[in-house]
Amino acid sequence: MRITKYEHAALRIDEAGRTLIIDPGSFTTPLDDLAAVVAVVITHEHPDHWNASHLDRILRAAPGVPVFSTAGVATSAADHEITVVAPGDEVTVDGFTLRFFGGQHAVIHESMPQIENLGVLVNDELYYPGDSYAVPEGVEVNTLAAPIGAPWLKIGEAMDFVLAVAPRRCFGTHDMTLSGVGLTMHRQRLQWATEQGGGTFFELDPTQSLDV
């Protein structure tokens, strides 16, 4: 499996000639080489995790592929066909097995309503929690895409999340809100947390890949 990180929260997973796209949002530059896409996962409705132009671009290249997300995204993306999934669901599509966890977006502020959020485990290898610290209970996570910067994120809580998951491999995502200095600092903290469980932390910049 090859995992490619793009700007902010967007991930591309390639396995046996097939491609899965996760969270292509407004902070991500247009994706290309999309003909092999077999599915899209959108963790929640915030625009930094999906927008219509990205979705339309993917669907033009790979017509009819399923888009898995929350009921909130189905409402926001009413012009698109969204397959609604929930924590506890498992689906298999063309070589990818997707297991969903979580349920709620992390709290930004009490004045803002909480929305649905999905964590997703891909082929029992890669776990990405979306905008949450949802730990996939009972799962040994080999590779973790850990949120590293956000309006809702406190670095100590992000470190506790990595400590709780104890992945073999970890890299930071959700990072476009950070300066270069802030990104370096937060990577150092998540590297420390990863190493406490015997894992390895990888610094992935946009378009860099990790083979697992």
Image (cartoon, grey):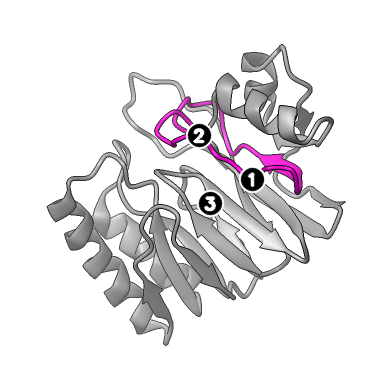
Which residue lies under the disc numbered 2?
Answer: 30
Disc 2 residue type (three-letter) = Pro
N-terminal of the two: label 1 or label 3?
Answer: 1
Which residue lies under the disc numbered 1?
Answer: 33
Q: Which quadrant of the figure contains the C terminus? A: bottom right
Q: Position of residue 17 (x, y in %)?
A: 77, 61
How packed mark 1 is, by other alpha carbons closer than 10 Å (few <14, some 14-19, many 20 or more), is: few
At mark 1, the secondary structure is loop
Mark 1 and mark 2 in contact? Answer it, CB < 8 Å: no
At mark 2, the secondary structure is loop
Q: Position of residue 16 (x, y in %)?
A: 78, 66
Q: Which quadrant of the figure contains the N terminus? A: bottom right
Q: Nearer the viewer, residue 85 or 80?
A: 80
Q: What residue range appears in magenta? A: 25-49
Residue occupying image coordinates x 55% and y 39%: 31
Q: In the current view of this chain or complex, which residue is farthest to the bottom?
A: 198
Q: Main secondary structure of the magenta part?
A: loop
